[in-house]
Image (cartoon, grey):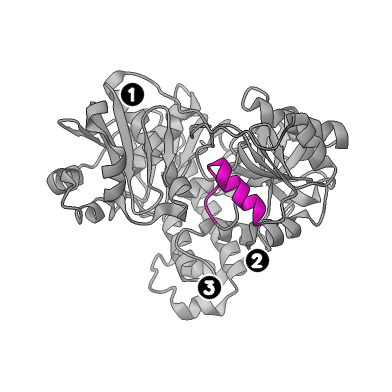
Amino acid sequence: MQIFSMALGQHDHNTYDGVFHNQIERYSRVKHNVGGTAQFYDKYFKPEDHEIFAFTTTKGGIEEAELSHRWDLANTFGPTCLDFKPEKLWDYWKQDNLYYIDHHQSHAAYAFLHSGYAESDILAIDGRGVNFRCIFVDKNGTIKDLSKQAQVGRLWSWFATRMEGFGELDAGKMMGLSAHGEYNERIHLALDADNLKFINTELIHEFLPEDISATLQRYTIETIRDIVFPLKTCENICIAGGVGYNGYMNEEFTKHYTNVHVPPAVGDEGQALGTYMHADYTLNNSIHVPDTYAGKEYEFDGGEPIRPREVGEMVAAGKIVGWFNGKSESGNRALGNRSILADPRNPNIKDIINSTIKKREDYRPFAPAVIEGHYQHYFDTNQPSPYMSRIVPVKSDAIPGVTHIDNTARIQTVNREQNPNFYDVIAGFYQMSGIPMVLNTSFNCQEPIVETPEQAINTFNNTALDAVVINGRLVK
C-alpha cells in the first residue's frame, strides 16, 4: 500500500512519503511552524497518489484543523480517532484509508525501527502528546504509562515559557545554560512537589535562570534513574520525543544499557517519519528506514569547483565556512549537509560565531564532528554518537572551541559510509592540523536551518562567514 504520512501538531509540521521528509519550517522559514495545520493538509496530501493517509497529532492539532470547513478528516473522524489509546506498540486505529496512531507511538516506532535492533526497550518522552507525556515500551512491545511519574518534558516547557529570554520550545537553550548554574535544593523541592502552581512567578524571579536550569537537569537525570532504569528488560534502549534531545540524559543511559540509540529527528519534527514507518510495518510487513538526508536536491553552478579536503584545509587556516552538500538532514542537528564549520582549536571561536554569525546567546556551545575512529582519544564515552545526541566529558585540552564550561561536548561521530564528502572535509582538516575533527553547527542565523542554495547565499551575505561551499562550488 502506498502511504502518505503527516504530523498534525501545533508546531513542527512535517510530511513524509517514503522518500522526501518535508520539514515545512525549512520552506516557510518560520521556526516550528506554529499553527496552520489545515493549510498544510490541503497543500501536500494528494489522495489520488496514496492509498493510506497515516497521521498522528498532539493535543490541539486536530482541534485546530476543525476550524477548516474543507478538512473532512478533522470534522468527520477527529473525535473517533482521538478515543483510541494503545496498549501495545503496534496497535493502531484505521477507518477506510485513514490510519492513526498515538503521538508517543510514533516517536517509539521511529526510534526502534531506525535502530535496527531485533529487540529493545523504548523511552518516548516529551512535553505533551494526546494520551501520554512519557511511555516506556518493553522488549515485548507493551506500553507502560509514565506520564505522572516522569513529567520532565512538561517541566522543561513550563520553565522555558515563563523565564525571561526563553519560549515554550526553548528547552534546548536551557540545557546549554545549565552548565553555567548551580544546583539548588529549594528549586528541587518545588519540582518534587509535582504542582506547577506552587512554582509561581515569584519563585521563578527569585532564582537565576542558570540555577533553575542546572537543578532541572539534575532532577531529570535522577528521575530517569529512579523511574526508568528499574523497568529494563534487555540490553538495548531506543529514545525519542523532545526530551530525547537532552544529551546529558542520553549519555546517562550508556552507563546502564549496552546499546543506546537516539535517531536524528528525535522530536516532533520526526513524527511523520515514525507514523509512516509504523503504518508500513503493520500494513505492508516492511521495515522502512528513512535516509538521514531526506530533503530535496538542488542545482548550483556559481562559484568555483573545490574538493572537500580543500574545504578542510581552509578551516584549518582559520576560515569559517558555510557547508551546503546534497540533501538536507532530518531533525534539528546539522549532520554535515547544512553546517557551519570552524576550527575547534580556537579558544575564541564560540564567541566569534555566536556574536557575528549565529547572533545568539553567548553561553550556547558548539559541537565537534569527529572521525569515528578517533573519538575515544578525545572524549570519555563508550559508543559512537552519529546523530549528535549525547553530551560527554572531554579528555583533551587541545579543542577549547568545542568544550563547554563543564568540560563536556555534544559529539557527532562521522565515518565515510555515513557521509563521504563531510568525512573528507574532516580528513582535510586532520591532515593540516593533527586534530581529527571540526567545529560543526547548523547553517542558519536566527531562522530555520537553510534548505536552498539561495538561503545559504543570503545567510552568507548577512553574516561574517568567510566563504560558503554549495555542492562542491566555492563562493567567497
Q: Nearer the viewer, mark 2 or mark 1?
A: 1
395 in relation to 290, above or below? below
Q: Nearer the viewer, mark 2 or mark 3?
A: 3
Task: Give the vertical position of 29 relative to 44 (above or below).
Answer: below
Residue 445 visible: yes
In the figure, is residue 200 to the left or right of 468? Answer: left
- Numbered circle sitting on residue 181: 2
- Residue numbers of the magenta segment: 447-462
Q: What amino acid type should be assigned to the residue bearing mark 3?
A: Glu
Query: Is 460 inside the magenta-drawn segment?
Result: yes
> 10 Å neighbourhood of mark 2: few (<14), some, or many (≥20)?
some
Helix, strand or loop status at disc 1: helix
Say which amino acid is labelled 1: Tyr
Pointer 1 local density, CA inside 10 Å: few below 14, some 14–19, many at least 20: some
* Residue closer to the observer: 436 or 23: 23
Query: Which residue is rendered at x = 34% and y = 31% of the image?
Result: 276
Question: Alpha-carbon distance for marks 2 and 1?
Answer: 45 Å
Point out the residue furthest to the front here: 302
Circle on res. 281: 1
Q: Can I make out residue 137 in this image?
A: no
Q: Which residue is label 3 attached to?
A: 164
Which quadrant holds residue 339?
A: top right
Q: Is residue 82 above or below residue 197?
A: above
Q: Quadrant of residue 307?
A: top right
Q: Which type of secondary structure does the marked residue at label 2 adopt? A: loop
N-terminal of the pair, mark 2 or mark 1, is: 2
